[in-house]
Amino acid sequence: MKKIFFGVVITFLLALSFVSAVSLNIEPQADDVAMIYRLDQPAVFDLKITNNGAGDYFMFYNFFGSDMFPKGTVQIGGGETKLVQVGIYPREDLKEEGWVQFDLYIQGQNKDEMKYPLMVKVVRLRDAFEVGAEDFDPSSGKVTIYVQNLANFNFNSLDMKFKSPFFDFEKILSIGPHEKETIEVTLNKEDFRDLMAGYYTMNVEVTAGDQQADVQGTIRFTEKDIVVSTENQYGVIINTKKITKSNDGNVVSDTTTVIKKNVISRLFTSFNPEPDLVERKGLVIYYTWERELDPGESFVITVRTNWLLPLLIILLIVAIVILTKQFSKTNLVLKKRVRFVRAKGGEFALKVAVMITARKFVERVNVIDRLPPITKLHERFGGEMPKKVDTKNRKIEWYFDKLQAGETRVISYIIYSKVGVLGKFVLPTTTAIYEKDGEVHDAESNRAFFIAEEARKTVED
């Protein structure tokens, strides 16, 4: 009987031990959890835990990481399923890279425990990211770059410095597991106007906590042939035209510039630089420049046409024509001269002569001359005698009934003064009134003068 009782007790104790042992069903929610090499941030495991035994308070620990959470215990009731987040911090002496397996221990309050193997991928910071950019060409004002988180790891407040031949800037980013972050960058075209098409390196300096790494990607600068032509023209008499050809693309481009001039304007036109080819087709001359421009290179052609000389020639021709016409319209021409003569009494004396020339037949010609102030008229006359001498009004008149075309008459007289004259002595003009084809006309002589300081000689205007 005692043996039976002892057996029942033993069976009950074994059953009680079996019931109190840890019985958990664990399902990891991800099989690619990452741990960043020597970064003081945890690898986080989302574990779906079902308690198949009695409710209990469970403690989690491991011998792989330097620290972990959750701290304390997690209550899971009997038959309850709970999602538990377990974080494992890497040790400073961690040397393994790639996939590493370690054991997670889960202990109940009665010290019963179980272990569960976990896999983590240890990744260096530089291998956790992929960086790159969309293709763009020289006409683009913006480019989109991206940062791809390759790891199942949550990065908070990453300091990222982006550098390339096209831009240079810094940005703080937080990127979740396997997340891709895009950034639109505004470009300054002057920064890359000299660059050729092709692939360029983008360097990203990533700082996470006390860890720093350089991540490199590529940027494809696609080919585009862009040659921009601008023209600036100014000046009228001296006309200057500047033609600028600029290669705003990213490939070597050939450019041809053609300017045409007529046979007249070409005589007064200069070029800088000289054209590569000159062709004449009829009355038009074609000037051609051919250049090969690298990206960002410019070629300037200056064409200067100086119309000053032909304008002066035209003005001179016009003046000659006008004067010729005016001269041809003049029926009667009066030309006045004066010269110094020596008087016996030592007075200041001048001999005045007026030449009257008829270009066309005229009649009833009345020539009037006036005496300058302070002078008197000598009684002796040369050539034609005057018709009337008005001493009171200081006026002398000659009269000719008619003058044939080409006929010339000369009148002269002497004036004197007891008062000496210094400087320039100016005589009044001589006037003629005549008839031509029944119409009354008038003509006037030049203004004659005498300079007393100079040697005694004839001077005329």
Image (cartoon, rainbow, N blue to C red):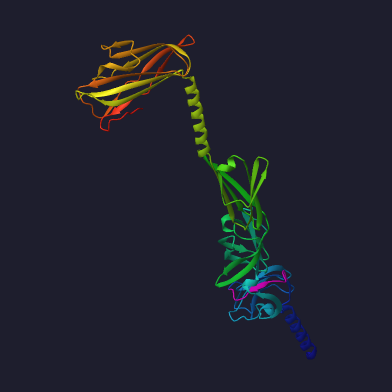
Check the picture and name the quadrant holding the N terminus: bottom right
Residue lying at 53% horizontally and 37% vertically, measured from the top left = 310
User: Where residue 205 appears, x then y in whole percent?
Assistant: 58, 68
- Quarter of image, res 304: top right
Residue 188 in view (yes/no): no
> Which sits in the foreground, 389 or 278?
389
- Quarter of image, res 338: top left
Q: Furthest-top residue in view?
A: 438
Taken as a whole, is the magenta stretch helix, strand or loop? loop
Residue lying at 32% horizontally and 10% vertically, measured from the top left = 388
- Quarter of image, res 178: bottom right
Give yes or no for residue 32 being in the magenta stretch.
Answer: yes
> Which sits in the foreground, 417 or 284?
417
Residue 272 in view (yes/no): yes
Q: Which residues are magenta?
A: 28-39
Residue lying at 42% horizontally and 12% vertically, measured from the top left = 434
Vertical side of 336 occupied by 250: above or below? below
